[in-house]
Amino acid sequence: MKLAVSLLIIVALYLVGAFIFNALTFLFSYYESQSTRRETGRWKPEWPQANGGWLSAMLKEFPITAIDLIWLPFGFLNRDSANNRYRGNNKPPVIFVHGWSQNRITFAWIIGKLRNRLAGRQLYTLNMPTTSRTLPELADYLAKRVDEALRQSEQSRAAIVGHSLGGLVTREYAARYGSGKIEAVITLATPHAGSKLSFPALAPVGGPIMHEMEPGSETLKRLAKEKMEGVRFVCVGSVHDNFVLPFDSSFLPGAEEIVIDGVGHNGLLFDTRVLDIIENTLDNTSVEAEDEKISEQNKEPVKKSRSKKSRANKADSENVEKSSTDK
């Protein structure tokens, strides 16, 4: 009986702590959004105004925060091979890259819902020790997984979906290894310009990444100079994000921006709008790639016919010249 009571007390304290933590992050997020709105020209007219919806977003985020410690252990089971056993592989695979202090289990809902919607694409995940490694070291983990996915799916390029830190890991991968193996990148709530909640003082617990995600860090300045040529890049951000502060840090200059509302940082991983964004982005990218391939194939015979015509004209000119000389 005493054990049961003790467990109930521990669970209750955990839930209360999760609720308070959640409430504080949304309080900071609300304050930061109001500061951003006061800056002339910064809050774009087409963005949701975020005057309300904060309580609703917080209540949606709370259960996700509460079950965090419960479901993370399941992420150590790699089900990729089993899940891909009967999937087609006529399109580039998709690799899902998790955020800080998380693992592959965070994409369980999204992958489950997309399994039938992304026909012809094999789906891969990975685990990274985000609380003890630097960004370049994490990029090495992704590089290994990209090569494995391409080898198993027999494709030359892969699409990458990165949540939070996962988006920065993807950019670091492209900076170190090039973007030749990347078809498209979709980032969900990634602090491309850093987050004010990334406190360097937390580095002993959160790892060196706390320094690298700080706004204005040398790492972010270096990545800002890197370009991913020939890769479709889509950034998804929520005006109610409670970890990426300010929320427009979720966007990268030159990339496509998609802004949603009513959902927090981790809530994006359970939002049906995100499913549509991923599916539509990858479908459109495949269509564009196919059109480009057909266009290239159509150009080839034209070049050959032109060269034949050129040789024929040259021969005619030589005959005319010879005839003139004989006369």
Image: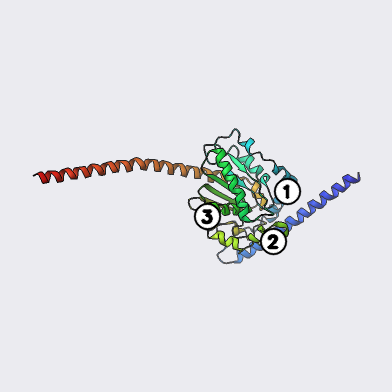
* Residue 255, label in figure: 3
Q: Earlier in the sequence, mark 3 or mark 1?
A: 1
Residue at left offset 62%, top offset 53%: 137
Name of the residue lying farthest toward the right: 1
Please say if 112 is above or below 34. Answer: above
Q: Residues within 10 Å of mark 3 (few under 14, many from 20)?
A: some
* Residue 68, label in figure: 1
Question: Could you give the CA–CA distance between mark 2 and mark 1, rounded to whole angstroms?
Answer: 21 Å
- Residue 213 percent location from the top left of the image: 64, 59
Q: Is residue 180 visible?
A: yes
Check disc 3 and give the amino acid type: Ala
Q: Which residue is mark 2?
A: 28
Give left or right: position of 197 versus 174: right
Residue 20 sits in quarter: bottom right
Helix, strand or loop status at disc 3: loop
Residue at left offset 55%, top offset 38%: 153
Check disc 2 and give the amino acid type: Phe
Check disc 1 and give the amino acid type: Asp
Question: Could you give the CA–CA distance between mark 3 and mark 1, rounded to whole angstroms?
Answer: 31 Å
Q: Residues within 10 Å of mark 2 (few under 14, many from 20)?
A: some
Give left or right: position of 155 versus 323: right
